[in-house]
Image: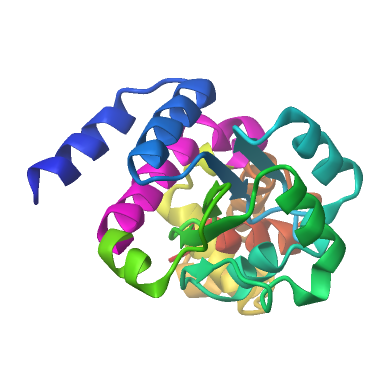
């Protein structure tokens, strides 16, 4: 591993709060010739409305405006992050479906930028945005800085998952026993408690005991929800 990559990872591993993460990202963003930075973290649960958190050094008025108008719903960069791991550069064409958002952002000095996403095995996704008041990010500039930005995204994501994710979704710290995983896997296959008991050569009462334990651990209202939550958190793989 290159020394700068190792230093970057070690630096973020030593940080213990979101504010410090943001300060470090802002410093690195300036070195990459960007005025602003933002990082959004999205949990895999709940399915209907996944919990999210946003950290940025954007102008405070713009942050409030973005939240009040619920611009995240129509933000093309957010929509892109939901379906693709590829980085994307801001452009008029990109923001054509959200012209009002684009014009307001530019009025606050967010005139050029790029967004890069990251997703891990536990289903948590993140998006790092670097922005500035100035020239558009060209393909040439991106190619020259891609390696550094890609590593920065990974480092920030690992750090934010460690620091912020447990506050948003305590279930990510859950650990299931081997037997609990087995029971949930067979439950997910549609097996009844009696059928699972036969497969695992245990009593039906024991199967139900494990199901109850996993429901409690995962804060699930029933066994179906327990299977779904465990799968979404990567606990059954």
- In x, y percent, where is residue 30? 40, 37
Q: Residue at x 73, y 42 (%)?
A: 108
Quarter holding residue 74: bottom right
Viewer-proximal residue, 83 or 30? Answer: 30
10 above or below 125?
Answer: above
Above or below, 93 relative to 69: below
Q: What stretch is highlighted in magenta?
A: 146-171
Residue 12 coordinates in the image, percent (x, y):
33, 32
Image quarter for residue 80? bottom right
Q: In which quarter of the image is residue 39?
A: top right
Q: Can residue 202 be seen in this view?
A: no
In the picture, measured across the screen, residue 62 lies left or right of residue 211, that is: right
Residue 125 image offset from top left, x and y in percent: 55, 56
Pick the residue in front: 33 or 188: 33
In the image shown, does 51 or 30 lie closer to the viewer? 30
| Most distant residue in the front direction | 135
In the rendering, at what x and y percent does residue 82 appear?
63, 69
- Magenta region includes residue 148: yes
Q: Does the magenta stretch include residue 15?
A: no
Name which residue lies at 47% across and 68% down. 87
Which of 144 and 199 lies nearest the eye of the viewer? 144
């Amino acid at each position: 591993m290159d020394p700068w990559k190792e230093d970057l990872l070690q630096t973020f591993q030593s940080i213990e709060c979101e504010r410090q993460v943001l300060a470090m990202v802002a410093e690195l963003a300036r070195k990459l010739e960007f005025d602003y930075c933002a990082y959004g973290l999205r949990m895999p649960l709940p399915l209907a409305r996944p919990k999210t958190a946003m950290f940025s050094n954007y102008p405070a008025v713009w942050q409030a405006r973005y939240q009040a108008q619920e611009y995240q719903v129509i933000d093309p960069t957010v929509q892109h992050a939901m379906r693709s791991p590829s980085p994307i550069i801001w452009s008029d064409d990109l923001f054509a479906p959200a012209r009002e958002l684009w014009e307001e952002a530019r009025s606050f000095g967010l005139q050029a930028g790029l967004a890069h996403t990251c997703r891990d095995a536990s289903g948590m996704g993140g998006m790092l945005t670097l922005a500035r008041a100035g020239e558009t990010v060209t393909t040439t500039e991106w190619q020259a800085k891609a390696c550094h930005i890609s590593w920065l995204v990974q480092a920030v994501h690992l750090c934010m998952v460690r620091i912020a994710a447990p506050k948003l979704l305590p279930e990510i710290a859950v650990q299931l026993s081997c037997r609990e995983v087995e029971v949930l896997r067979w439950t997910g296959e549609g097996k009844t408690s009696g059928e699972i008991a036969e497969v695992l050569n245990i009593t039906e009462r024991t199967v139900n005991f494990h199901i109850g334990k996993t429901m409690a651990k995962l804060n699930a209202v029933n066994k179906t929800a327990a299977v779904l939550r465990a799968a979404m958190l990567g606990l059954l793989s």
